[in-house]
Amino acid sequence: MLEEIVVENLRLIDRLPVTLHPGLNVISGETGVGKSMFLSAVGLLFGGSMDEAMDPAREARVEGRFRWRPEDRHLIPDSIPDRDESEMVVRVCRKPGGAQRCYLNGSMVSRRELTALGSRLVDVHGQRDMQRLLAPREQVAVLDRFAGCEDAALAFADHHAEVERLRETATRRAETERSLRDRVELLRFQVQELDQAQLQTGELADLDRRFRIVSHAEETLRALSKMTGLLEDEGTAAECLGQAGAVLQRAGEDDDEVSELADRCFNLAEAV
């Protein structure tokens, strides 16, 4: 089914086009000529990870052209673009400094989708690779076909998928319920804290006023000290009281008691 493969800028390969023919194709050569590299390139067409390029400044690319017979179309997933065509082009590339990209018939797909497709179309194995017949899934499929219970197996797979979907739904709902319970507990705790605080109407404004008074406490003390000095000055009583009232007035912008004391100084200055 694999008719042609082109490898460009991969490891030690600059560009290698290979055309395959029906029947047995043999690629031979001495150790180190690149047979394993070519086999790795074939594996890239079905979800393998692309490693270093020959030239890091250029794009590395592996492209394969497949052709299948009408009786083999059931092997091709419905999600594959142009599934009804007899030809399929798989392209895997990686630009300099970029991530690996996979395409089927020009449409981008994930490596997982390529892996799933490869398991249906190609069996790549070597001296250290696991052959497909050793995979438990393949062994079960062979037994199902031998026993003639493929339809029952498909029905069971559908029911199993539905059970898994319902299990996931139940898990999400349980997590949502647990999150809601935690939220209720948090709100109940916050309400309890607010009740224990015994907050009163206008308390925030009063606290803000007290905060401003405390923030200007040092300035208020300096103003009171200066007022004491003015009252002990040798000027007239009216002048001393007026100056002291002005000092206290500036310091009492946020303190009603200091402001009241300033007013008393002004009133006394007028009285004398």
Image (spheres, rainbow, N blue to C red):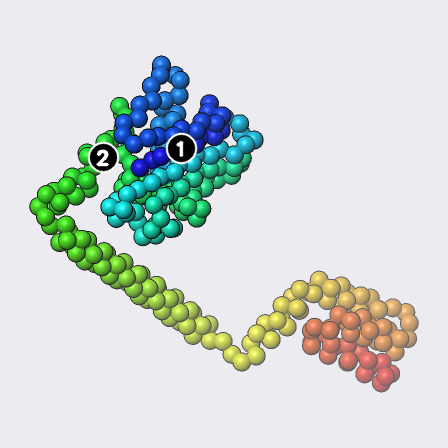
Disc 1 element = strand
Q: Amino acid at mark 2?
A: Arg
What's the distance in space between the residues labelled 2 and 1, CA to CA?
22 Å
Name which residue lies at 25% across and 48% down: 74
Q: Residues within 10 Å of mark 2 (few under 14, many from 20)?
A: some
Q: Is residue 18 left or right of residue 130?
A: right
Q: Identify residue for label 2.
A: 132
Q: How many other residues sit within 10 Å of disc 1, few (<14), some (14-19) or many (≥20)?
A: many
State the mark number for residue 5: 1
Q: Quadrant of residue 48?
A: top left
Q: Which mark is residue 93?
A: none
Find residue 98 and report its horizontal and vertical position in percent. 51, 39
Say which quadrant the C terminus sits in. bottom right
- The answer to which of 209 and 61 lies nearer the viewer is 61
Q: Tell which circle, 2 or 1, labels the residue nearer the N-terminal end.
A: 1
Specify whether residue 53 is in view: no
User: Which tag is nearer the camera, tag 2 or tag 1?
Assistant: 1
Tell me which residue sits at (16%, 39%) in the image: 139
Q: From the top left corner, tell me how far across and down residue 156 is, in percent.
A: 16, 55
Depth check, front residue: 230 or 162: 162
Give the residue drawn at x 43%, y 32%.
6
Q: Amino acid at mark 1?
A: Ile
SS class, disc 2: helix
Quarter of the view holding residue 146: top left
Is residue 23 among the parts visible in the rendering? yes
What residue occupies the far bottom of the structure in this picture? 271
